[in-house]
Image (cartoon, grey):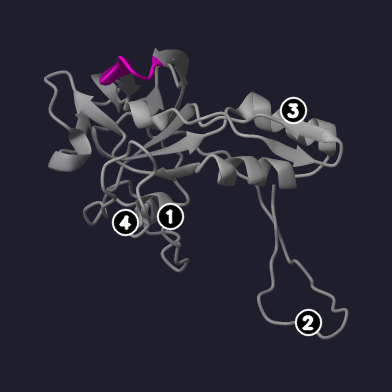
């Protein structure tokens, strides 16, 4: 999807001329052996829920990687999609997330090496030789308060019963020393609100904080295809 936005006010219809758009294929600098996980956890029993991960360096040079891990706690996607398909509106989806106190942040999930040392907190870049791989664990810190109560949302003739019961986590791995990393320095990227460190902690999350310089969402290169991993953990009683 490509969107063009003009931020100054338009008083009348105007024409714009796009000179050229070129799509190119870029090879990834990192890959997860398995890039998606879905599972269930008993919210009142599990303190730590570990998922083993393997990151590969598919390139022909040695690399050191940095990581951003962010999570969102809210209504499971199947419920949201059902509400949208029945109402043809985004309004009930937004109302659901607001009513159950759905929100995102950092600290609920952590990437650690095999020796349990945290990667982001310790600022330890992941070194992987050309063609090699690295093994670690994605640790989910599950708290009972993450699982919310069933709520009721009405929209038109429909009634939905959402619950805060899904922890969705995104992991992005990139090489901060890749030769092409400076190619788009003329674009300033706004920080993602998940790691801005200024919003309240979602239920069960630790106090929010700003990651160290160089490990922040806005410092992920726009023109680099890094490694991507998503986990969806459903919380049950």
Element at label 4: loop
What percent of the width, then of the height, locates residue 71?
A: 41, 37
Which residue is at a point 67% across and 32% down the rendered structure image? 80
Q: Earlier in the sequence, mark 3 or mark 4?
A: 3
Q: CA distance from mark 4 to mark 1?
A: 8 Å
The residue identified by callout 1 is 193
Q: CA distance from mark 2 to mark 1?
A: 29 Å
Of residues 163 and 138, the one drawn nearer to the viewer in this rendering: 163
The residue identified by callout 3 is 82
Q: Nearer the viewer, mark 1 or mark 3?
A: 3
The residue identified by callout 4 is 197
Could you tell me if residue 200 is visible in this image?
yes
What percent of the width, then of the height, locates residue 24?
A: 60, 44
The circle drawn on residue 10 is 2
Which residue is at a point 27% across and 48% down the rendered structure image? 177
Q: Earlier in the sequence, mark 4 or mark 2?
A: 2
Q: Nearer the viewer, mark 4 or mark 2?
A: 4
Whether 122 is drawn above or below 221: the answer is above
Which stretch appears magenta? 42-53
Element at label 3: helix
Q: Earlier in the sequence, mark 2 or mark 1?
A: 2
Element at label 2: loop
What percent of the width, then of the height, locates residue 44?
A: 34, 18
Q: CA distance from mark 1 to mark 3?
A: 27 Å
Element at label 1: helix
Q: Earlier in the sequence, mark 1 or mark 3?
A: 3
Report the side of 220 relative to 86 (left or right).
Answer: left
Instruction: State if disc 4 and disc 3 touch (CB < 8 Å).
Output: no
């Amino acid at each position: 999807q490509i969107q063009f936005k003009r931020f100054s006010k338009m008083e009348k219809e105007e024409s714009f001329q796009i000179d050229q758009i070129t799509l190119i294929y870029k090879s990834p600098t990192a890959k997860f052996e398995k890039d998606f996980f879905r599972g269930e956890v008993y919210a009142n029993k599990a303190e730590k829920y570990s998922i083993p991960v393997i990151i590969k360096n598919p390139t022909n040079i040695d690399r050191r990687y940095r990581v951003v891990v962010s999570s969102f706690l809210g209504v499971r996607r199947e419920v949201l999609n059902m509400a949208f398909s029945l109402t043809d509106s985004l309004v009930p989806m937004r109302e659901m997330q607001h009513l159950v106190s759905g929100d995102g942040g950092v600290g609920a999930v952590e990437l650690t090496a095999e020796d349990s040392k945290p990667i982001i907190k310790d600022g330890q870049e992941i070194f992987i030789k050309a063609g090699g791989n690295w093994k670690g664990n994605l640790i989910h810190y599950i708290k009972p308060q993450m699982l919310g109560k069933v709520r009721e949302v009405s929209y038109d003739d429909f009634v939905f019963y959402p619950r805060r019961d899904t922890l969705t986590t995104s992991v992005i791995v990139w090489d901060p020393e890749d030769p092409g990393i400076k190619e788009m320095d003329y674009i300033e990227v706004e920080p993602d609100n998940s790691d801005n460190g200024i919003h309240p902690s979602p239920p069960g999350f630790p106090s929010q904080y700003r990651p160290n310089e160089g490990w922040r969402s806005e410092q992920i290169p726009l023109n680099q295809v890094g490694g991507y991993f998503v986990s969806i953990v459903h919380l049950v009683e």
